[in-house]
Image (tube, rainbow, N blue to C red):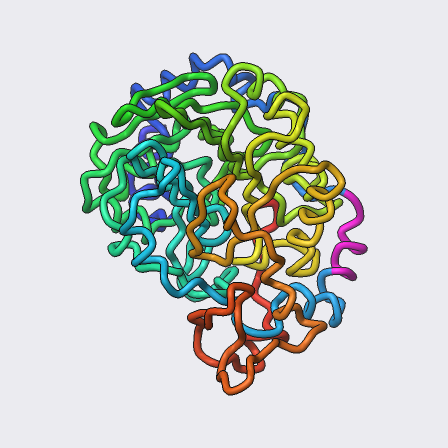
């Protein structure tokens, strides 16, 4: 037994840095006391399968089908908005502005403060720099160029939401971090001081720079490394300022709790809702666009209110559905519900409710089944606003329609 105990610290030292750290000490004691922790793991608000279900043979047929693989990637590099830096220098006229940086990363400027949700600036959402899902567009703006951020909010510890190189760069600033219970162990290992962490259980709140941040329930799971111990919590987030309220879903399956969150904290001026990386093989932990719209309406008391920003799509290839399907599904769901949505190109700032908020399906020229649109005399595709986007280098056969990276199932 003594030899086994002495071996554990040495094994932990060999653990890759990207795997983070397991909660221990006072943090672990707090986890064990949580009302959401039972039978040795954190529990979902309603039952959820956290591993692929159904026939894996059928899943493999879909996954490796040639045409399906082509459709999971855009036909050309995804555009990013070119003038983010200049526009971010001006305060929002309404007091609220959102900038979707791709996937679930959003910079929210709310009532004079700046909140950065789930920042992923790394090239891959993976523990390894040489493998794993690679981003389909460049980051719209260098992380250092964003300027000061009051608080970084993390929804959970999966690689496409908690990114080692991004956190290590942010650790060198003086920003605070709001994270679900247990996730602070990862950040401390990566250099974030404990006094800059605000670690919350569901329905707990903290004040940062005049904003109230509340961790609210979500239906998902956690895990980095080779074992998934469910010792770190996952959450959605409410951020309330003096004049505005916003909601970020993180990753979640649909569940009735959205109504309760809306009743207590809503209505919201804007919601950021996960609508991508869904599959019939993991229906409990990610929402389809239709479910995402239903969640948005639940959060708003059952009637259209505010603006929904679809997130968790377009940047990484994480599921069997076609690349553009989440966007198209959200457009259809919004039309059916009579709800307002925003459809920005990655990096395009907008003010929810403003007359010039982006609403055109910018992705259509880049769908694998369609040829990219090139304006006369231009050398690159054109965004709906008519401005030439900044893109990555010209794609090779492996990096455009034919690219196939390993995918993170249920991330």
In the picture, measured across the screen, residue 184 lies left or right of residue 296, that is left
Say which residue appears at 42% left-offset and 48% top-offset. Answer: 99
In the picture, measured across the screen, residue 48 lies left or right of residue 117, that is right
Q: Where is residue 257 in the image (x, y as percent from the top left)?
A: 62, 21
- In the image as oriented, which residue stretches furthest toward the front? 355
Closer to the camera in the image, 224 or 384: 384
Tell me the quarter of the picture where residue 107 sits: top left
The span shown in magenta is 54-62
Q: Is the magenta stretch mostly helix, strand or loop?
A: helix
Tell me the quarter of the picture where residue 74 sits: bottom right
Closer to the camera in the image, 374 or 4: 374
Say which residue appears at 59% left-offset and 35% top-offset. Answer: 252
In the picture, measured across the screen, residue 360 lies left or right of residue 68, that is left
- In the image as oriented, which residue stretches furthest toward the bottom? 377
Residue 49 sits inside the magenta stretch: no
Residue 25, above or below 249: above
Q: Position of residue 195 (x, y in %)?
A: 20, 28
Which quadrant holds the N terminus?
Answer: top left
Tell me the quarter of the picture where residue 219 sits: top right
Whether residue 7 is visible here, answered yes or no, is no
Closer to the camera in the image, 210 or 382: 382
Residue 182, above or below 289: above
Say which residue appears at 68% left-offset and 34% top-offset. Answer: 49
Q: Where is residue 38 in the image (x, y as percent from the top left)?
A: 54, 16
Q: Where is residue 159 in the image (x, y as percent from the top left)?
A: 46, 48
Whether residue 55 is visible here, answered yes or no, is yes
Closer to the camera in the image, 72 or 333: 333
Residue 98, above or below 140: above
């Amino acid at each position: 037994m003594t030899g086994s105990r002495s071996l554990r610290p040495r094994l932990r030292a060999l653990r890759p840095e990207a795997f983070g750290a397991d909660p221990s000490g006072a943090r672990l004691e707090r986890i064990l006391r949580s009302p959401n922790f039972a039978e040795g793991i954190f529990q979902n608000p309603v039952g959820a399968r956290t591993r692929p279900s159904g026939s894996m043979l059928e899943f493999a047929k879909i996954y490796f089908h040639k045409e399906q693989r082509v459709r999971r990637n855009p036909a050309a590099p995804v555009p990013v908005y070119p003038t983010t830096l200049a526009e971010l220098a001006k305060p929002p006229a309404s007091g609220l502005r959102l900038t979707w940086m791709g996937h679930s990363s959003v910079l929210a400027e709310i009532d004079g403060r700046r909140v950065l949700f789930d920042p992923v600036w790394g090239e891959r959402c993976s523990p390894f720099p040489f493998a794993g899902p690679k981003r389909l567009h460049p980051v719209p703006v260098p992380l250092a160029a964003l300027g000061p951020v009051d608080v970084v909010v993390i929804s959970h510890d999966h690689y496409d939401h908690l990114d080692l190189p991004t956190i290590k760069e942010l650790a060198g600033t003086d920003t605070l971090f709001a994270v679900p219970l247990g996730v602070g162990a990862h950040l401390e290992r990566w250099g974030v001081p404990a006094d800059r962490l605000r670690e919350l259980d569901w329905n707990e709140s903290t004040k940062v720079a005049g904003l109230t941040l509340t961790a609210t329930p979500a239906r998902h799971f956690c895990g980095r490394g080779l074992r998934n111990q469910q010792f770190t919590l996952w959450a959605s987030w409410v951020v309330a300022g003096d004049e505005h309220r916003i909601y970020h879903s993180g990753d979640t399956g649909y569940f009735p709790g959205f109504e309760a969150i809306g009743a207590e904290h809503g209505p919201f001026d804007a919601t950021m809702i996960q609508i991508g990386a869904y599959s019939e093989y993991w229906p409990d932990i990610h929402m389809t666009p239709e479910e995402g719209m239903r969640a948005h309406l639940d959060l708003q008391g059952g009637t259209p209110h505010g603006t929904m920003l679809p997130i968790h799509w377009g940047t990484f290839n994480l599921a069997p559905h076609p690349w553009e399907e989440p966007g198209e599904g959200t457009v259809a769901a919004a039309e059916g519900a009579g709800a307002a949505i925003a459809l920005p190109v990655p990096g395009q700032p907008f003010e929810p409710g403003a007359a010039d908020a982006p609403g055109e399906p910018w992705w259509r020229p880049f769908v694998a089944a369609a040829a990219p649109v090139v304006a006369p005399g231009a050398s690159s595709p054109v965004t709906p606003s008519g401005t030439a986007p900044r893109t990555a280098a010209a794609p090779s056969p492996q990096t455009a329609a034919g690219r196939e990276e390993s995918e993170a199932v249920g991330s």
